[in-house]
Image: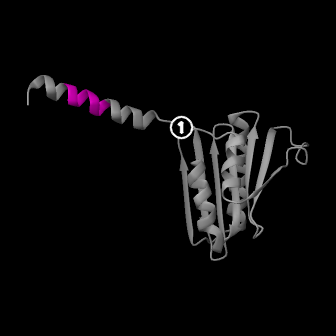
Amino acid sequence: MKLKDIIILGIIFILIILLFVFAQKKAVSSVEFVNIAEKYHLKTFNMTKQLGSIDSIQEAIFAESEDHWQIEYYVFNSTKDAIQWFHYNQKEQNSKYTNPKFFDEHHHKNTNDYTIITYQSYIHVSQIKNTLVFANVPIEYMNDVNKILNKIKY
């Protein structure tokens, strides 16, 4: 292998690493969220008017299963508002579930997420830019919820 080939491979390797490091998750729109939820046979409800007293929320969509668990999707006025709601929700859930079976949290450039698993519940909150997704469901529906969360990449 020539020196020129090694340099080119090195540059390609560095570019791949930089792409991975600086890649940002993409927030899904409310239309995308609704479309995916409905593909999984969830009924969707626009709850924006019902939450109208909360100034920082631009849009709220709840997706509910026939088994009555739901995933909530929010669009906030700003990323700062979404982060504030993420931390508020995290604090609330941590105070409710003081001894979880599993806890995981991640903070990245434009995202935050955490998961709590207890013997009865599965809780997942994910914030990407000015959006937030929240699920608190009975543990037996964790796999169903995760299929949807993985599809929307939250």
As drawn, which residue projects farthest toward the bottom? 119
The residue singled out by tag 1 in the image is: 109
Residue 117's image quarter? Answer: bottom right
Magenta residues, as a range?
8-14
- The structure residue drawn at horizontal position 63% and vertical position 50%, both measured from the top left corner, is 126
Q: Position of residue 18 (x, y in %)?
A: 38, 32
Magenta stretch containing residue 7, yes or no? no
The kind of residue tagged 1 is Lys
- The structure residue drawn at horizontal position 61% and vertical position 64%, both measured from the top left corner, is 116
Height in image: 78 above or below 83?
above
Side (left or right) of 144 relative to 52? left
Q: Nearer the viewer, residue 17 or 104?
A: 17
Answer few, some or many: residues within 10 Å of disc 1's Cα (few below 14, many 20 plus, some between 14 and 19): few
Q: Position of residue 125 (x, y in %)?
A: 65, 54
Residue 134's image quarter? Answer: bottom right
Q: Position of residue 131 (x, y in %)?
A: 69, 41
Quadrant holding the N terminus: top left
Q: Position of residue 99 (x, y in %)?
A: 62, 72
Dominant secondary structure of the magenta stretch?
Answer: helix
Q: Nearer the viewer, residue 67 or 134?
A: 67
- The structure residue drawn at horizontal position 21% and vertical position 30%, both measured from the top left corner, is 9
